[in-house]
Image: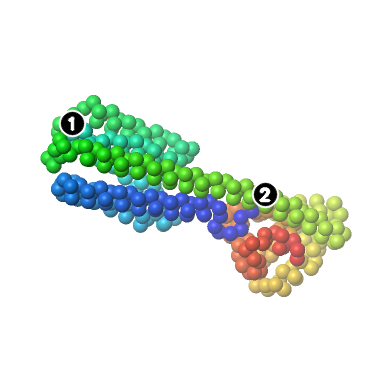
Amino acid sequence: MSEEPENVDDEYERNYLNLINKYLVFLFLLFLFYSVFIVIFFGDALISTFLTIITLFWFFLMTIKGKTSHYRKILKGGIIFVFILLIFIVSFFHIYTFKNAGVEYFYFSLLFVIPFFFSYKEEPLLILAIAFVISINFIACLYFDFDFLPKSRFFEAGDFKTVKLLNILFSVASFVMDISFITQKDDLIYGLIEDTRIKNSTIEDLQKTNTGLLKQQMLINHLTEENIREIYQLAESNSPFFYDKFQVFFPHFIPEILAINPNLIHSELYFCALMKIDFDTKKIAQCTNSSIRAVESKKYRIRKKLNIPSEMNINSFILKI
């Protein structure tokens, strides 16, 4: 049962977005250093400026990464756009440096980072499309000359060894960082799975405890099996007689709830009555023809009005009254 507006999934998404932000910072530093190296050692100001401009994409994505409620599609679309753009940038520089500067190693860095940004389970077609684009670019650059594209006049034959070494080092660094961030993403996923398992286990224990408390209170109120079936049937059918019959069976419950907070309205008292007979969020939604989200919101407002501690299950609190 979820009574708080933020759940485990929200926490995972927030942590994952922070991880994306760190990766974007890494890309920014990588491109900035690379552009400075190009202009200092080769004097190619045009290409250096182009690489520097690319870093603005990382700033853009870092700016919107935390605003998922309004910019979720923009974030995903921006990542896809930049990913495709990087593929063509690698292809261009491969041709620009006469196919002899080791730029092709960055294709593998792009392939390795796919599991970090995309989910194989949720986006298989998108991943296949990106891998296909990378493969086509790699094969095309290998077999075609692309004479219509410009070649660098700053690269001389003796410079390729230095540039090739630099590109190999950068591609290896990118590969290591890819593995690091993928590992951190996996840790988040495994943490989410474990948190969910613990949460489900806790809910089962609470439900058992609540059922025991409910049976004890029904025995105290001298309710027969027939009385119990009757009140459950009235609640499940959303009968207008349920609330009156409930007060007959539990005469002290509503006064004690109102003693805690007399400002509770009728619909909130009705929800408290349903929780008193141990109806969970899904069951309350079904018998009141409400959405689960609406029930969670109502329970959250009741929790605030009754000053129930956040660490305490609201059904357990209600059952003890």
Bin the neighbour count of mark 2 within 10 Å (Cα to Cα): few under 14, some 14-19, many 20 and up: few
Q: Which mark is residue 146?
A: 1
Does 119 sit left or right of 144 as displayed? Answer: right
Which residue occupies 12% across, 40% down? 153
Q: Please tell me whether residue 83 is drawn above or below residue 245 in the rendered image.
A: above
From the viewer's side, name the closer residue of 84 and 29: 29
Q: Give the x, y percent position of residue 9.
A: 53, 51
Secondary structure state at the residue bearing disc 1: loop
Marks 2 and 1: CB-CB under 8 Å?
A: no
From the viewer's side, name the closer residue of 54 and 256: 54
Does 26 sit left or right of 320 as displayed? Answer: left
Q: Give the colouring mode of the picture.
A: rainbow
Q: Quadrant of residue 141?
A: top left
The span from disc 2 to disc 1 (Cα, nearest Å) is 61 Å
Q: Please tell me whether residue 275 is drawn above or below residue 164 in the rendered image.
A: below
Q: Which residue is mark 2?
A: 201
Looking at the rendered structure, the kind of residue marked 2 is: Ser
